[in-house]
Image: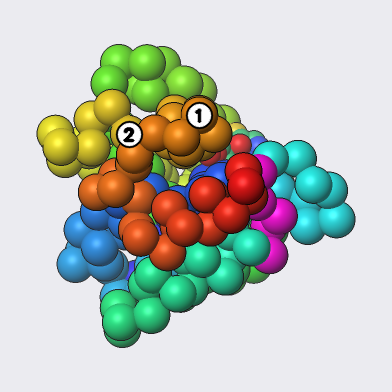
Amino acid sequence: MTIAVCPGSFDPVTNGHLDIFHRAARHFDEIIVLVTGNPTKTSGLFSVEERVALIREVTRDAGNIRVDFWGGLLVDYTTAHHVTALVKGLRSSLDYEYEVPMAQMNRRLSGVDTYFLLTDEKYGYTSSSLCKEVVKYGGDVSGLVPDLVGEAMREKFR
Ligand code: PNS
């Protein structure tokens, strides 16, 4: 059984993230979308519980995707749950520069490999932080985040 983790802060999840989850789910038996961060701290727009609930809702029809959260070192989670791979999306060389040291550190710490999927070009400029900024000032992010997530963001800024 091959289990891969898609880790991230997902504050909140975007359609770019979802595209990566679904594409990864075609290559592994099970995908765990892992929301990282301290559940007792409220840094970010959404709490860890809210992020998890949103992702669960928008992935409910996917048979081999489940959602969990973790406040510690990523490799401690992957080792404890027999995870064989990490999967991350790459939008640009900026992502590459940010991701490579983490992938190498995780491999050094636990042997887990990181697989990179190139982001679909239609989500090349989509990020959680940019979507939050746009919604904060009343802009439209439909098509970039699930409708449920867009509504949850508007509610936060109301
Ligand atoms: O949403 P992001 O910024 O892409 O997520 C980065 C994340 C959550 C994958 C990274 O910060 C992480 O792995 N956090 C867990 C703590 C940890 O293991 N840090 C060492 C990474 S080498």
Q: Which residue does the numbered mark 1 point to in the structure image?
A: 137
Extreme residue toward the left, this view: 121
Quarter of the rendering containing residue 21: bottom left
Q: Which residue does the numbered mark 2 point to in the structure image?
A: 126
Badge 1 crowding class, 10 Å Cα cut-off, few under 14, some 14 to 19, many 20 or more, is: few
Image check: 97 left or right of 109? Answer: left
Work out whether residue 33 or residue 145 is closer to the camera in this orientation and state it.
Answer: 145
Q: Which residues are magenta?
A: 45-49
Residue 71, x across and y down, in percent: 74, 53
Residue 54, x across and y down, in percent: 51, 66
Q: Quadrant of ligand 1?
A: top right
Residue 141, x across and y down, in percent: 34, 41
Image check: 77 left or right of 100? Answer: right
Badge 2 crowding class, 10 Å Cα cut-off, few under 14, some 14 to 19, many 20 or more, is: some
In primary-sequence order, the first of circles 1 and 2 is: 2
Tell me the element at label 2: loop
For image coordinates 57% across by 70% down, the residue present is: 53
- Is 132 magenta? The answer is no
State the mark number for residue 82: none
* Mark 1 sits near ligand 1, with its Cβ under 8 Å away: no
For image coordinates 29% across by 48% down, the residue present is: 142
Tell me the mark number nearer the camera, choosing from 1 and 2: 1
For image coordinates 38% across by 80% down, the residue present is: 60
* Mark 2 sits near ligand 1, with its Cβ under 8 Å away: no
Most common secondary structure along the magenta stretch: loop
Image check: 91 left or right of 85? Answer: left
